[in-house]
Image (cartoon, rainbow, N blue to C red):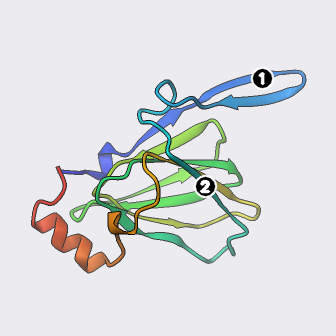
Amino acid sequence: MASVHDCTLHRIRHVHDERGSLVVIEAGRDVPFEIKRVYYIFDVPTHSSRAGHAHRALCQLYIAISGSFDVVLDDGRERRRVTLNHPDEGLLLGPGIWREIVNFSGGAVVLVLASAYYAEADYIRSHDAFLAAVAAGAFP
């Protein structure tokens, strides 16, 4: 059964010298899944939220490449809030977790690495439907 505590923070390789910083992300080395899709979210008004859904099978890594935001995690039994504000740290989310991205700072950019191509059927967009899926044991 998926748990908010299964969502973990991961340090990402960070190289720094007098010229600046470089973060390296390689599938299979730095991310525990093959990266099939990459997207980013930006220009979000400070009091807005994003996400508001769960996935049936998709794994994702959220990274604050600029600014900060909070990710509110919900496994149907417990909620947890994680703040992301370092470009060399990512939050790994598996299937069966409801997520909302809130509390965006000015200039925040969310980079998302995903384990699969976009498939609408993988999304659960109603919190009530998510809770019903949790109750039915739909997530390992």
Q: Nearer the viewer, residue 80 or 97?
A: 97
Give the percent coordinates (x, y) of residue 95.
Answer: 31, 53
Q: Is residue 83 left or right of residue 131?
A: right
Q: Which amino acid does label 2 sit on?
A: Tyr
Report which quarter residue 8 is drawn in.
top left
Q: Taking 120 as reference, is 87 above or below it? A: above
Question: Could you say which disc has been placed on residue 39 in the image?
Answer: 2
Give the percent coordinates (x, y) of residue 52.
Answer: 43, 72
Give the percent coordinates (x, y) of residue 62.
Answer: 53, 49
Q: Is residue 46 left or right of residue 99?
A: right
Q: Residue at the left extreme?
A: 136
Q: Which of 63 and 4 is in front in this view?
A: 63
- What residue is drawn where x is 49% and y is 34%? 10
Give the percent coordinates (x, y) of residue 124.
Answer: 32, 70
Disc 1 target residue: 16
Q: Nearer the viewer, residue 4 or 97?
A: 97
Viewer-side label of 1, 2 = 2
Q: Taking 29 as reference, is 84 above or below it? A: below
Q: In this view, does 133 lie to the left or right of 89?
A: left
Disc 1 secondary structure class: strand
- What residue is drawn where x is 21% and y is 63%? 77
Q: Which amino acid does label 1 sit on?
A: His
Question: Could you say which disc has been placed on residue 132 in the image?
Answer: none
- What residue is drawn where x is 28% and y is 59%? 56
Instruction: Rate crowding at label 2 as few (under 14), some (14 to 19) or many (20 or more) other CA atoms within 10 Å.
Output: few
